Amino acid sequence: MGDPRRIKTNPAIRKMLSQPAAFRPQRRQRPRRGTLRLFMAIGDYAQVLAVGLALCLAFQAAPAPDLNLSPGRVAGIGLLAATLALFVRRGLRRTSAHHVGSTYVSSVRSAAAVMIAFSGIAVGRLLLGSTTGLGGDLLLLMSWAVISTALAAALRLLGTRLIAGPESLTTNIVVLGPSPQAGALARILTERSRGHRQVLAVLQDDMPENMVMLDQLIEQGEVDIIALAGMDAEGIQAICEEFGDRPVHICVGFDAVALERAARGSSHLDDPVLLRLLPGQFDDWRDSVKRGLDIALVMASLPLIAPVLIMAAIAIKLDSPGPVFFRQWRFGLGTQPVQILKFRSMYTDRGDTTGEARTTARDSRVTRVGRILRRTSIDELPQLLNVLRGDMSLVGPRPHATHMKVEGNYYFEAVEHYRLRHRVKPGLTGWAQVNGSRGEVDTLDKAYRRVDLDLWYINNWSITLDLKIIFKTVFGGFATLKAD
């Protein structure tokens, strides 16, 4: 990670510390591709099941010979077909990366996936099933396949425009680097775009005003990819440090010579022209699934923990004067400030809203009730509201106070690669917390360990990992004396 004693100041973040409310993140205006894909996948499931139900009603009105139309059986076939189509479509997407954003190609790919799925079910029925009712089953599957295939194509062609407009699947790219190389990469990207991506700007990386322009475009939600051309390792590292926490993909672009010499076997990559440098959940269907999981789990847990929340609020009011809740600015997605909620655990006149004063074991500022709340982590539960608002997730790197310091230096300056932990939303719990990194951070070694664990989580993220962390938090890592 580099020498931990090498502290580099960050004027941009320091400027934000004095007025965090003025630097609140703007809501992204352009719809996210991953969210659109999730909506389309839900639509595919819905239309396949709806067609199956309609065929049931139609065939019941004019019965066909040897046709089993039990609702459970038809629903099972529909779910199987829609699931198979989902996996087939993902496979087709990987083999046609040049066309990944084309609405026309997307519709053809979806229609082909549905037809392949139903064909596979029909072949399986023909080879593995009995001859009884075979004719009726094949008639049902054939009718179902034809109608659902047409609807799958129409859903892609019309749905995208109805939901978000034709520009929603356009990938916006800013090319960054020395002028000759950046211009050459921009031409390659434009030639290979096939209508689904556009180069917004070609910027020289050695001009400060260009970095300001790029930052503004990202803030407005207009940039999907930063493509680096002709930059050395030091320059690439600088860009990753500056924009690595933002909701964009940072990629290295290949020049014409490299593309001409590239083996055909590289076509399985998402884009043979661009190599992604940093992992993250931005603009991915899994991010939408993670958001859905957050909402579902929070809503399901609220009735269970409501008595705990009420008792905690009453105890706080009885123990010491002051409000029930404590608000504090912390770093969120993209190192942007978000205001998080906690149960107040300190005396009102001794609390630190900035987080600069480190909380220590047996801290005299902590109230009697606050000590219990902190030991059991109940003081963190109001952040479930932050999760519902979308500022946080159930699982992710814990949000740090904007003024938090370690060994006299700001945390965001003391630890190299610190901002990369903000490529994802902060969490109520995280990989670091269930692996023993909780409580006081009084040394650089502890600070580095936490960031290392956070980055490991981002690099290895999955829904399964999130569920594992939630399980370990609830059944083993929720209460700790270190939280004192």
Image (cartoon, rainbow, N blue to C red):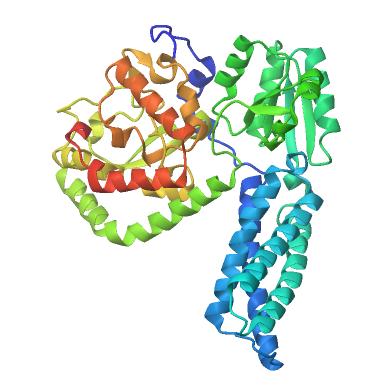
Q: Nearer the viewer, residue 184 or 260?
A: 260
Name the residue located 59 percent from the left edge and 14 percent from the top edge.
Answer: 238
Which percent across, then down, holds residue 385? 40, 49
Which percent across, then down, holds residue 224? 68, 35
- Quarter-wise, where is residue 177 in the image? top right
Q: Nearer the viewer, residue 212 or 188?
A: 188
Looking at the image, residue 374 sits to the left or right of residue 140; the answer is left
Regarding residue 47, the answer to whether it shows in the image is no
Question: Which quadrant: the N terminus?
Answer: top left
Name the residue located 65 percent from the left edge and 73 percent from the top edge.
Answer: 126
Which percent across, then down, holds residue 26? 59, 38
Name the residue located 68 percent from the left edge and 90 percent from the top edge.
Answer: 65
Name the residue located 86 percent from the left edge and 32 percent from the top edge.
Answer: 191
Which percent across, then down, holds residue 8? 47, 10
Question: Which quadrant: the C terminus?
Answer: top left
From this view, report whether residue 434 is shown above or below residue 4.
below
Looking at the image, residue 459 sits to the left or right of residue 106; the answer is left
From this view, report whether residue 465 is shown above or below residue 278.
below
Total label count? Answer: 0
Looking at the image, residue 71 sits to the left or right of residue 255; the answer is left
Regarding residue 106, the answer to whether it shows in the image is yes
